[in-house]
Amino acid sequence: MISPSRLLRRAAAAPRVAWQLARYGRPNRLVLFGHVSIGDDLLCTALLHECRRRGENNLWMMTRHADLFAGNPDVDRVLPLDDYHALALRRLGVSVVQPYYVGMKPDDDAPSPAPREHFIAQMCRLAGLTGEISLRPYLHLTAAERASGRLSPRQVVIHSTGRSTKFFSANKEWFSARFQAVVHQLHDRFDFVQLGAAADPLLEGARDLRGRTTLRESAALVAASRAVVCQEGFLMHLARAVDVRAVVIYGGALHPAISGYATNENLFTPVPCAPCWQRNRCDFARCCMTAISVEDVAAALLRTDALHGETLSLDSVSLA
């Protein structure tokens, strides 16, 4: 039984949806992740790429982050996220894919079922794709954008906390003081550029761009960097999308095999409780994070920097 309030919302949306159908027609396939996070929309570029590789055309994406898809040859139309428009297309027989992979629930701190394969593989499987899948997202920058992102030949982007994200996870936090210690230890080797929200703790010795960059400006800064240092999350996906290596501090909440990339330095702590797949609850004082030292991260960054200029390998998996 549909509630009266829901019926009213559908009725109010009907003129808008009718106009959208008349203006845009219908796609062969529509992809939308939903109202979760920007990183999930970026991962949808991998799914769209695999659809295009298989000869599909007239592919649409619904998103609140259209800048992620600018210049992307795998997408034929990018539209604002509209659940009612998507519902109408589904009822008209369009293949509507909402590839919500299994993972930590944004509104529940109970342990989630452990995923069996990489998030991108799960998304492609939910779309009904088979065969070889490349495990990487894509973001396409213009030459001018790439040039604008280069501030220094020794540039390294650093992001120290996810506290300003929509769905904060305390179990992914490595402590801002330790990021600060990494900057202090390697400031004579690299020029650090701090990205993040304006409210993030300032890292002394880094160029402060907190809250001052658009999504594409952030991508350009990452693309022009020798490496990225961050926690598990959006920035590591953004780095892979523009072919830059990253030092990713995982700890033990998630496993790199499920969300990460082999080209990165993934600092995972194999304590008995890891991966726990919990956002905030921890009965062990987050020992998986405290075990990762400043020296561990600094050494990982030096190893990553030594590979700068080498082509990144491409992870792949075959779906039956």
Image (cartoon, rainbow, N blue to C red):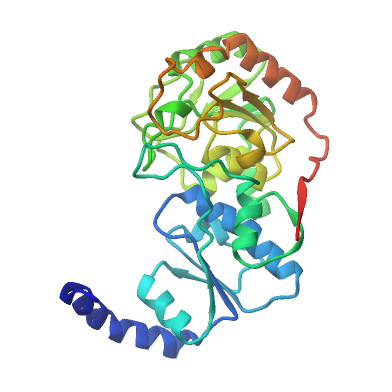
Give coordinates of residue 60: x percent, y percent.
Answer: 55, 73
Residue that appears at 41% across and 52% down? 36
Q: Evaluate whether residue 250 shows in this view.
A: yes
Give coordinates of residue 131: x percent, y percent.
Answer: 78, 62
Residue 49, placed above or below residue 113: below
Q: Image quarter for residue 14?
A: bottom left
**Looking at the image, which is closer to me, 49 or 214?**
49
Give coordinates of residue 115: x percent, y percent.
Answer: 58, 44
Residue that appears at 39% across and 57% down? 35
As drawn, the residue found furthest toward the left would be: 4
Q: Where is the N terminus found, in terms of image quarters?
A: bottom left
Residue that appears at 57% across and 14% down? 292
As drawn, the residue found furthest toward the bottom would be: 22
Residue 122, placed above or below residue 106: below
As drawn, the residue found furthest toward the right would be: 310
Q: Where is the C terminus found, in terms of image quarters?
A: bottom right
Residue that appears at 72% across and 18% down? 302
Q: In the figure, is residue 263 to the left or right of 207?
A: right
Q: Evaluate whether residue 205 shows in this view.
A: no
Total labels drawn: 0
Give coordinates of residue 220: x percent, y percent.
Answer: 60, 44
Residue 295, placed above or below residue 71: above
**Looking at the image, which is closer to me, 138 or 281?**
281
